[in-house]
């Protein structure tokens, strides 16, 4: 006579264990994807802020050198997307120096551009600041 033994429930425990392990892996991979996507978006927004600050510096240089207009602080609003979402503040200070024989007066401009987007304290806030010093050609 052969005796049959029943192993009822053993395969059920194994199946539940495998389902839990697969579910944990899916949740982990989904979370990793969301974190990577968010990091990428923040990086792109930071690069846009840097380009917006650079455009503010170039705008300030053009106003200072070509237009001889060095206002203390002005706001520059780009009209090209996606930079149109940024608020750009350009600050300018000028000073004059006299150099060597024959005496030549050179005007030096210190420009600062601050580009920001979003509201401070929120996750979508980004800001970049660039400082540049330029001078006009000696006469």
Image (cartoon, grey):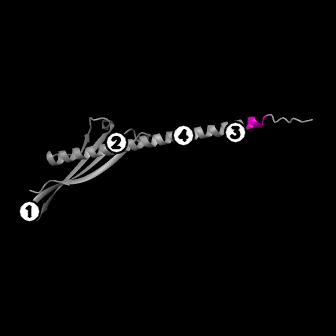
Whichever of labels 3 and 1 marks the residue nearer the N terminus, that label is: 3
Q: Residue at x 45, y 43 (%)?
A: 39
- The C terminus lies in which quarter of the figure? bottom left
Estimate the x, y position of residue 17 in percent, counting from the top left. Answer: 70, 39
Mark 3 Cα within 10 Å, few/some/many (few <14, many 20+)?
few
Look at the magenta stretch and give its main secondary structure: helix
* Most distant residue in the front direction: 1
* Most distant residue in the bottom direction: 101
Residue 50 visible to the viewer:
yes
**Which residue is disc 4 drawn over?**
31
Whichever of labels 4 and 2 marks the residue nearer the N terminus, that label is: 4
**Which residue is disc 3 drawn over?**
17
Mark 1 Cα within 10 Å, few/some/many (few <14, many 20+)?
few
Specify whether 52 is left or right of 123: left
Whichever of labels 1 and 2 marks the residue nearer the N terminus, that label is: 2
Specify whether 9 is left or right of 88: right
- CA distance separating discs 3 and 1: 87 Å
Estimate the x, y position of residue 137 in percent, counting from the top left. Answer: 13, 55
Query: Dots 1 and 2: beta carbons under 8 Å?
Result: no
* Most distant residue in the left direction: 102
- CA distance separating discs 4 and 3: 21 Å
Q: Which residues are magenta?
A: 9-13
Q: Is residue 111 above or below residue 19?
A: below
Mark 2 Cα within 10 Å, few/some/many (few <14, many 20+)?
many
**Which residue is disc 1 drawn over?**
103
Estimate the x, y position of residue 109 in percent, counting from the top left. Answer: 20, 53
The number of numbered badges drawn on the structure is: 4
Pair 3/1: label in front: 3
- CA distance separating discs 4 and 2: 26 Å
Estimate the x, y position of residue 117 in percent, counting from the top left. Answer: 36, 39
Residue 48's disc is 2
């Amino acid at each position: 006579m052969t005796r049959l033994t029943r192993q009822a429930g053993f395969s059920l425990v194994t199946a539940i264990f495998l389902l839990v392990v697969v579910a944990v892996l899916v949740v982990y991979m989904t979370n990793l994807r969301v974190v990577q996507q968010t990091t990428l978006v923040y990086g792109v927004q930071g690069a846009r802020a840097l380009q917006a600050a650079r455009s503010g510096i170039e705008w300030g240089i053009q106003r200072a050198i070509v237009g001889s207009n060095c206002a203390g602080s002005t706001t520059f609003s780009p009209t090209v997307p996606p930079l149109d979402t940024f608020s750009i503040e350009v600050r300018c200070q000028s000073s004059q120096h006299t150099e060597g024989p024959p005496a030549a007066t050179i005007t030096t401009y210190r420009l600062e551009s601050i580009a920001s987007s979003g509201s401070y304290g929120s996750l979508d806030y980004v800001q970049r600041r660039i400082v540049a010093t330029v001078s006009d050609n000696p006469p």
